[in-house]
Image (spheres, rainbow, N blue to C red):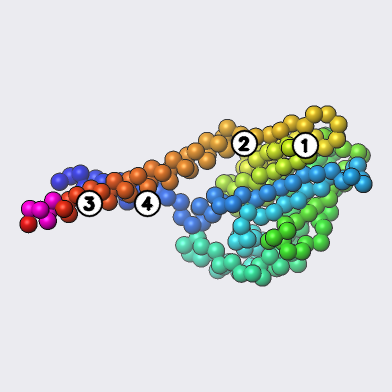
Amino acid sequence: MTVIPLAALAVAAAVLALPSPAAAHPFGDPQTVSITPDEQRPDVVRVRWRVGGPDDLTLLGVSLGLLPADRVLLDGAVDYRATDPAVLASSEQFPAYLLKQITVADGPRQCVGVVAPLKALARAGATVDYTCPGPVGTVTVAVRMLTDLNPAYRAMATGPGGQRAVYGSGEDSHDWTLAGGAPTVGSTSPSTGRSAAIQLAAVVGAALLVAVGALLVSRRVRRRRAVA
């Protein structure tokens, strides 16, 4: 008689523990970043950023004061509209945010970024050319896009020669070899891997609890019918 209530409590706890729409949002498609040298200008590093999901642009637009706050609903859902990317692209706030959140350094020297004209932001992303004090070999690129909104956001980055890295909160800086020397191929860090494993385990565990609860309830109903 006590098994069913305990199972129901376990199922309810698992459901309540699942992330809300707002909390789960960063676990959708990751952002992507590509780092490449400019073949014509040896002192320029080109960084191209693409958002994971277009509704992330709506969240960012609300954060920057470009879109009304009620576009993020009380339950955490996002009221995305097809015009949102154009609102960000035509603003001064978004390019300034982009240059603040993505930086490039050649050793101790910072490189100056210029945002290319923004067209089809949701689909094509944003491109920034960073001009360094001299020809670049290895540069340090920091990416903090959207992690100020939620530290769970991640960005998958690629560079010349098959170089890869995963950017996230607390792991926002990576060295890239653009000319000369052997490139270092990055990989998902242990903490990022643990985070993904924990999220997967939570979802699987919740599903198992729900299934067990449903099975126990079904058995109880069948027993009652048999007694009747």
Say which residue label 1 marks. Answer: 161
The residue at 41%/44% (across/down) is 204
Nearest the viewer among 98 and 210 is 210
Separation of disc 3 and disc 1 at Cα? Answer: 56 Å
Q: Could you say where residue 160 lies in the image, as x and y percent from the top left?
A: 78, 39
The amino acid beneath tag 1 is Gly
Residue 20 visible: yes
Up/down of 28 relative to 120, above or below: above
Say which residue label 3 marks. Answer: 217
Separation of disc 3 and disc 2 at Cα? Answer: 42 Å
Residue 63 visible: no
The residue at 12%/56% (across/down) is 225
Say which residue label 4 marks. Answer: 15
Crowding around mark 2 (Cα neighbors within 10 Å: few <14, some 14 to 19, many 20+) is few
| Label 2 vs 4, first from the N-terminus | 4
The amino acid beneath tag 3 is Val
Separation of disc 3 and disc 4 at Cα? Answer: 17 Å
| Label 3 vs 4, first from the N-terminus | 4
Q: Report the magenta residues as a range.
A: 223-227
Which element is circle 4 on?
helix
Which element is circle 1 on?
helix
The residue at 42%/50% (across/down) is 18
The amino acid beneath tag 4 is Val
Question: Residue 173, labelled with which disc?
Answer: none
Write down the quadrant of residue 82 in the picture.
bottom right
The amino acid beneath tag 2 is Thr
Question: Residue 188, labelled with which disc?
Answer: 2
